[in-house]
Image (cartoon, rainbow, N blue to C red):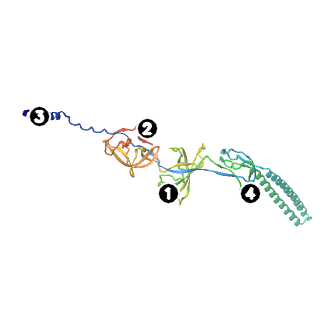
Amino acid sequence: MQPVRAIGPSVVLLVLALSGCSEKPPQQAAAPAAPPVTVAQPTRRTVTDWDEFTGRFEAVEEVQVRARVGGFVTNVEFRDGAMVKTGDLLYVIDPRPFEAVATQADGQLADARAKAELAKRELDRSLTLNQSQAVSDSIVDQRRQALQAAHAAETQAEGALKAAQLNIEFTHVQAPITGRVSRHLVSVGNLVQGSDNGTSTLLTTIVSMDPIYIYFDMDEATYLKNNRLYFEGKRPSSRETPNPVQVTLTGETKPSHDGKMDFLDNRLDVSTGTLRSRAVIPNHDLSILPGQFARVRLIGSAPYEALLLPDTAVATDQSRKIVFVVKDDNSVEARPVVLGPLDDGLRVIREGLKAEDRVIVEGLQRARVGAKVSPHPAAQSSGGKTGDKT
């Protein structure tokens, strides 16, 4: 038994040695593949900066149609909300009382003319008799004064007739301008007051439609910037030149109407620090109504060469804007940039980039600063392809 006990430990050691020889050494983990990203070079083209404001449309002309003579309304000759032209009939006020007054004034004028004719004949007779001393000079003077009084009475009668005829004309209320009429505020059978008593009745309103004004308030900083560019010869003044504007209506993503500057106020509003401004917008299809809001873009610089990127390629790092640039060794670098405005869907990069830089435009979430990536060029498209463009 002793030899067996002596062999036992040796066998155990041999088995452990053999089992150790059969185990394979651990393999090292494979290095992760570089994540794929889409890169593109900045687009180079000539751009112009635009300043953007919130504006409201107002009619070029607006008229309150009021009764000029009093009386009962007999007809309403327009459809509520319709387009009317200058001279179109809107209301008819009962003209019969004014026609009677005109007939009376016509008779008074005829009487005054007859009296004037008689006074003239009497003066002519007295002048003839005065030559033979049959009539004294005082009688001639009296008849000359009578003729002058007759002519004055004739003039008064003519004025009364014209006033009566005007009142007849005013009973037919016509549109003073071309535009869109509001609803009728007075119905047939109602009594309206004329302008003689100072409280004429409002019948309806009319606003012109084409063209249309848009008013907006320019902040003081923008005004000073544009003023500086004007004195440097880089931008014409809107006071002297109808600078172009672009208008984007509510719900639109791109400007749909073009116009021109028409007016700048002569002082800044002391309560808001803004300058009242106005542009004229063509409205041939009559789709814009006074009172609508819109975004107004006003030319804010001279044309200049710029580099542009899709806005999605710009990231925010606390208070600064950065883009991720792929270097020659395919490692990622965070590049601070200074942004400009959007132009045709692309963001202007004022500082921080070169035309040959490869910028990550897709896959930003997979990029890590200092790590390598697998860059793939972006597909060429009309909105963001690289290269020069003017």
- Relative vertical location of residue 346 with respect to residue 107 in this rendering, above or below: above
- Relative vertical location of residue 265 with respect to residue 257 in this rendering, above or below: below
User: Looking at this rendering, what residue extends furthest in the left direction?
Assistant: 2
Which residue matches tag 2?
381
Which residue matches tag 1?
220
Task: Give the Cα separation between the discs numbered 2 and 3.
Answer: 81 Å
Mark 2 vs 3, N-terminal side: 3
Q: Type of residue at label 4?
A: Asp
Which residue matches tag 3?
8
Mark 4 vs 2, N-terminal side: 4
At mark 3, the secondary structure is helix
Q: Type of residue at label 2?
A: Ser
Task: Identify the residue at horizontal 89%, vertical 64% (top origin).
Answer: 130
Expressed as whole percent of the image width and height from the top left, the position of residue 171 reads: 75, 50
Expressed as whole percent of the image width and height from the top left, the position of residue 315 reads: 39, 47
At mark 1, the secondary structure is helix
Mark 2 vs 1, N-terminal side: 1
Q: Type of residue at label 1?
A: Glu
Q: Type of residue at label 3?
A: Gly
Q: Is residue 179 visible?
A: no
Mark 4 vs 1, N-terminal side: 4
Q: Which mark is residue 196?
A: 4
Could you classify mark 2 by the number of other residues whose Cα lies within 10 Å: few (under 14), some (14-19), or many (20 or more)?
few
> Mark 4 or mark 3: which is in front?
3
Task: Identify the residue at horizontal 82%, vertical 54% (top origin).
Answer: 105
Task: Give the Cα separation between the discs numbered 3 and 1.
Answer: 101 Å
Task: Identify the residue at horizontal 36%, vertical 48% (top origin).
Answer: 335
Task: Identify the residue at horizontal 36%, vertical 45% (top origin).
Answer: 324
Task: Give the Cα separation between the discs numbered 4 and 2.
Answer: 71 Å
